[in-house]
Amino acid sequence: MDSRSPFVLSTHELARRPGTMREVTLEIDAPEDFGTAVMGVEPGSPIALDLRLESVLDGVLVSGEAQVRLRGECVRCLREITDTQTVEVSELFFYPGARERALEQGDEEAEDMLELEGELLDLEPVVRDAVISALPFQPLCDENCRGLCPGCGERLDDLPHDHEHVDVDPRWAALAALASEDDAGTKERPAADGER
């Protein structure tokens, strides 16, 4: 844990006194990798935290909200998406040694327990997990987005409804060209004497 990180908070005032509470309001610049491949928190944008730290018997309970500014792209048409989202944050930071004791007692889930380091707690993994789990798996610019035209790659929503591409099998393309030449020749050729 880097004690200089803005995500690291001191719990000194709570001093293992169950029932003691402290409210914290923070604004932290978002790190680079706060998201998934298609959607995430805009790097450098403010993460607004409105939290309550409560001393409980086993540790310090952190609860509240994180508001983030999101940027990503639509999985259908690749248009940029921007949004603001508020997510719930709730995590119990156990007092040092609790994880080790729980593992000794056979608690297999204890490996994931978060502990205080002395009087410090690190909010970054908690906020990161809350934000990433709330992100849409397949973000869309609009629920009715029709995606991209497979022929020209343009957004279908920006094209006329009758837009289409006629794909001719390359094996028939030469024959089609001959047929169109033949049609043009028939129209232009004057009728012979015997055809009148």
Image: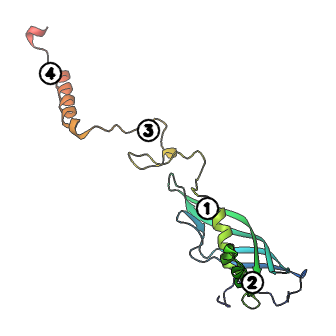
Per the model, the C-alpha gap separating discs 2 and 3 is: 64 Å
Label 3 Cα neighbours within 10 Å, binned few <14 / some 14-19 / many ≥20? few
Left or right, residue 190 beside residue 18: left
Residue visible at 64% across and 89% down in the picture = 2
The amino acid type, in three-letter code, at marker 1 is: Thr
Find numbered disc 2 in the image and state the secondary structure of the residue it sits on: helix
Residue wearing tag 3: 163
Per the model, the C-alpha gap separating discs 2 and 4 is: 96 Å
Which comes sooner in the sequence, label 4 or label 1?
Answer: 1
| Rendered image quadrant of residue 127 | bottom right
Return the x and y of residue 63 as percentages of the image width and height.
Answer: 79, 72
Which comes sooner in the sequence, label 3 or label 4?
Answer: 3
For discs 2 and 4, the disc positioned in front in the rendered view: 2
According to the image, what is the colour scheme of the structure? rainbow
Front position in the image: 5 or 176: 5
In the displayed structure, would residue 134 be above or below residue 21? above
Which comes sooner in the sequence, label 2 or label 4?
Answer: 2
Residue wearing tag 4: 189
In the displayed structure, would residue 119 be above or below residue 141? below
Per the model, the C-alpha gap separating discs 1 and 3 is: 29 Å
Numbered badge on residue 82: 1
Per the model, the C-alpha gap separating discs 4 and 1 is: 62 Å
Residue wearing tag 2: 98
Which comes sooner in the sequence, label 1 or label 3?
Answer: 1
Front position in the image: 138 or 148: 138
Label 1 Cα neighbours within 10 Å, binned few <14 / some 14-19 / many ≥20? some
Return the x and y of residue 3 as percentages of the image width and height.
Answer: 68, 91
Left or right, residue 39 beside residue 180: right
